[in-house]
Image: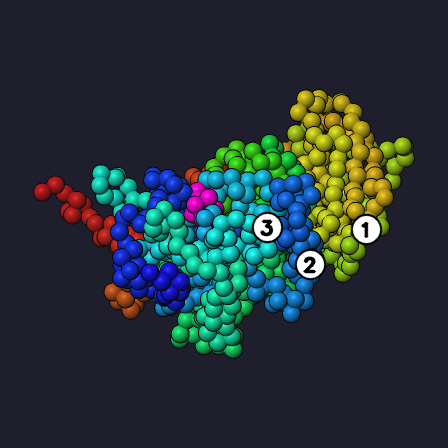
Amino acid sequence: MDLERICMDLVHADDEDAAAGIVSYHDLDDDHHWVPLGGIENNLSIAGNQQSSATAALVEKLVNSVDSLLIAECLLRSIAPESSEAPSSMVGAAASFLGVPEGGISGLKPPERAKLAEHIQLVATGSRTDPCYTIVDEGEGQRPRDFPSTLCSLVQTNKLRIKFVQGKFNMGGSGVLAFCGQRNLQLILSRRHPRLAGAGGTDVQGWGWTLIRRREPDGGRKSSHYEYLAPGGSVPCFEGKVLPVRPTRDGAYGGSLEWGCLVKLYNYQSEFPSAITLDLNYELSRRLYQIPLPIRLYERRSGYTGHSLGTILTGMSVRVADDRSKAIEKDFPDSGIIHVDGVGDVPVEVVAFKKGQGRSFLTAATAILFTVNGQVHGGLGRRFCSREAVGLDFLKNDLMVVLNCTDISARVREDLFMPSRDRLRECQAKRAFEEALEAYLGEHSELSRLNKERREAELRDRLADDKPLTEALKSIIDSSPELKALFRLGTHVPAPTVPGDRDQDFTGVAYPTFFRLVRREETGAFPKFDCPLTRGCRIRFETDAVNDYFTRPNDPGTLAVSPPALFDRVALHNGKATLVLKCPPKAAVGDDLDVLVEVCDSQKKAPFATRLHLTVVEDPPPSEPHDHPPSPPRTGGLALPKVVEVEEDDWASEEFGPESGLSIQRDVDGGLVAKVNVANLHLRQFLLRSPKADVDLMRKRFVYGLVLAGVSLWQEYRDDAACDELIRSTSSAIARVLLPMIVVLGSLDEAALAPG
């Protein structure tokens, strides 16, 4: 049996049926030729419980290739990967072994990125609707006899103690199997790097290969399981040589591979039918925020045209850096640090995109990213920015927040992130993150200014033409005692709030020359501050540090507070740093606290040190001014909402669809904005059946009815974290029956309601 020929036929097969036919033709599909993946017969509970999306699963394969390449480079230098001599991070390994600047790929010139990217390749072949994805890397590779304990293993400890790799659990790579067509086929071909092969064994320099498939329940088994081809208990292998399996300039195959690994995913259930250089590339970037090594993407399916069917995957952080002048608001990204109860101190990066530019970088589910070693491990959607404590409704479509969780404890990472690394677990740590982030974003002065600016641009013209609608809505409310009780008196719709002035141009330096308190007219050894018992105090600093000083990948600055229990958060933007300190748990009014604040980086022989004196005081009464606009009172009703009619062209930005009803969001003045979907499918269908003379009336009834229902829903759910989702889903259901209900109920009379 020509095992090399069979293997090469499988490499070139671009359809799962063709691959299965090759196996069957050579009589290799008999059950006795196959071994359970990982040596575990009940392995569906592991392999089938991984990533929830095809792209998230594909990310794990790419990350495995990055790990393999870094391990190879470490071993080639005779450094044990698990030893103290090995790098302690992926960024450090990429810098030490492959010359990537510690600031990341953005520090490489385009030709340098292109050359480095050829070490790991993702190739699309087959059909548009059922593509095959092949990942090729020049990593360490594996000997055929080691397949059972490496490439075909599950829940082993292969990389558990290596600090500079992402993989830990030895199962994430199996997540792709669920998305490999109907037969769940995956080809693996690998050869150990010749300089790493070691001695002994006839297969040391050879290529090993196998096929993984899903076997459905039979013989009394209650569930499917995954198994790999191993006739006689060993994976097929053949003599080592250079194989023509990599993409060429014009084709899918023909390029040389001397060692490393090739993984082919047949009929992959991709979420993106476009060329992989487009939508898939963007989605991979979202999930690989700061990938340590670039990856080359090749589109080799027929039917795609363009000036280039290849691109380089560099991660979201590089896209942000490369597009900064075009897509990013001036003076962003900026940086800060938040203290998360039970977690520790976490760096925060905020990226504000120019109006409408966020759609090229973000999705509704990827506004707030939790990263570990640059890979996104979970996130929060943009609706988080609509929470009352945050109040950034008008900026949410163009705002990205990155939380670097690389240095949090292993225990917290295990509790917060699922092993699949694509979503967060509902736990105390997640709630603590949300609370800390609410405070950080809610008090970010520049984001607040931008939010007001966006609000003015969005509502100015619409509200100017809103007077007839407002008067009509007021008349409806005045005619009902129940509605009058819900709303406050008055019909005035406040004019758009004029945003504050933008900071003057600021040019920072990478290593600040000062970090000091904003001048205060007072005498004494240490500056004195009152610290309210439960609300903490804000200390203003000035500095010439660049905005990303605390979050940049290369030598970020640090801020330490002593005693540590007092630190809550710090935000840095355009030379202004606001430090928030909180009282310790057992503090009492009248307590005096001495505080030391130190800011440092690798270029400082001694940190910038500031000593403060805090006195714990009573909290100010609620009526005093504070950082957020006042909420509408719980009693006395609600202010008349501002109404915005949303057409179909704006569905994407408002996260609407054909059956959406409305959304309610908080305005910067503390009131409400009701955004009504006037392109609703059921409204359109009803108007098509209505007499022409009634169309305008019916449309207004739809808008007024939904607004009144929406405000009532907001009053009911305003304290619920899922308020926005509840209003959207409920109003969608109401929109389906609203106009028929109004017409039918309006036509009823006593005779129609009489019994019999």
Q: Which residues are magenta?
A: 147-154
Question: Dividing the image into 4 quarters, which one contains the C terminus?
Answer: top left
Q: Secondary structure at mark 3?
A: helix
- Report whether 139 appears left or right of 609: left
Q: Vertical placement of 612 versus 263: above or below?
A: above
Q: Which mark is residue 512?
A: 1
**Percent coordinates x, y for residue 168 in the rendering:** 53, 42
Q: Position of 81 compared to 271: left or right?
A: right
Distance in Å between CA atoms under marks 2 and 3? 15 Å
Q: Crowding near pointer 1: few (<14 within 10 Å), some, many (20+)?
A: many
Residue identifier under label 3: 71
Residue at numbered disc 2: 99
User: Where's residue 148, x and y in %?
Assistant: 43, 45
Above or below 688: residue 584: above
Which callout, 2 or 3, points at the residue further toward the start of the chain?
Answer: 3
| Badge 1 amino acid | Pro
